[in-house]
Amino acid sequence: MPGQAKILTPSAEKRVFDYIALERPRTFKRDRVKLLLSLRAGMRACEIVGLTFADITDAEGNLADEIRVRKETSKGGKKTFTRRIPMHPELKVALSDVMPSIAKPGLRVVLNRSRQPLSANGLAVWFRDLYKKVGLEGCSSHSGRRSVLTKLARHCSKHGASLRDVQMISGHAELASLALYVDPNREAKHALIRAI
């Protein structure tokens, strides 16, 4: 669909991670967390900046197996709900690298260089500038979300899941809204027809 953020291919993702490792060694760990919250959890910019350590830890203060995305940090209106996103192993490792020894539950996970909370707009600009520096035109803070939701939709039948499961991860109130995020695959359509 015209105007939508482009989806990142695996090679494009690798280019972005290689870039932050080589060009931003001082902020690499924090930058990797921001990228993985987008590219492995499919979170919106407003959800990423609203994430606190209480949302990613259990009662003992250890990293949890799920990310809690609170209703108040999410986009949407009355139909918005608090949801839980299973924690990707790569994201769990990255979070453990930036987690303070004593993480105050209300402390934000993503902060700016001055160790202050980052705004959703500030994070969106960060993503846009990063993708532009890597040479990925048409990518934005929503590219990671679209990439994740497309991958999940394509793989759900392999794991006994349904689009409803993908919808619960995405936080969309309606399946029709989720459909706008999933990029169609021409080759897959041909394979589906050949399979019947």
Image (spheres, rainbow, N blue to C red):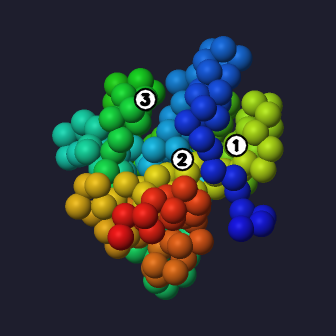
Quarter holding the N terminus?
bottom right
Measuring from the top left, give residue 155's x and y in whole percent: 37, 54
Identity of the residue drawn at 70% across and 56% down: 5
Query: Of residues 116 and 19, which is closer to you in this image?
Result: 19
Q: CA distance from mark 1 to mark 2?
A: 10 Å
Describe the element under mark 1 as helix, strand or loop. helix
Q: Earlier in the sequence, mark 1 or mark 2?
A: 2
Q: Which mark is residue 38?
A: 2
Q: Amino acid at mark 1?
A: Phe
Q: Amino acid at mark 2?
A: Ser
Identity of the residue drawn at 80% across and 44% down: 137
CA neighbours of label 3 inside 10 A, class few (<14), some (14 to 19), many (20+): some
Identity of the residue drawn at 37% across and 64% down: 195
Query: Of residues 85 and 150, which is closer to you in this image?
Result: 150
Residue carrying label 3? 94
Q: Which mark is residue 127?
A: 1
Measuring from the top left, give residue 82's x and y in whole percent: 38, 68
72 versus 188 height, above or below:
below
Left or right, 17 with reference to 78: right
14 versus 51 height, above or below:
above
Left or right, 59 with reference to 99: left
CA neighbours of label 1 inside 10 A, class few (<14), some (14 to 19), many (20+): many
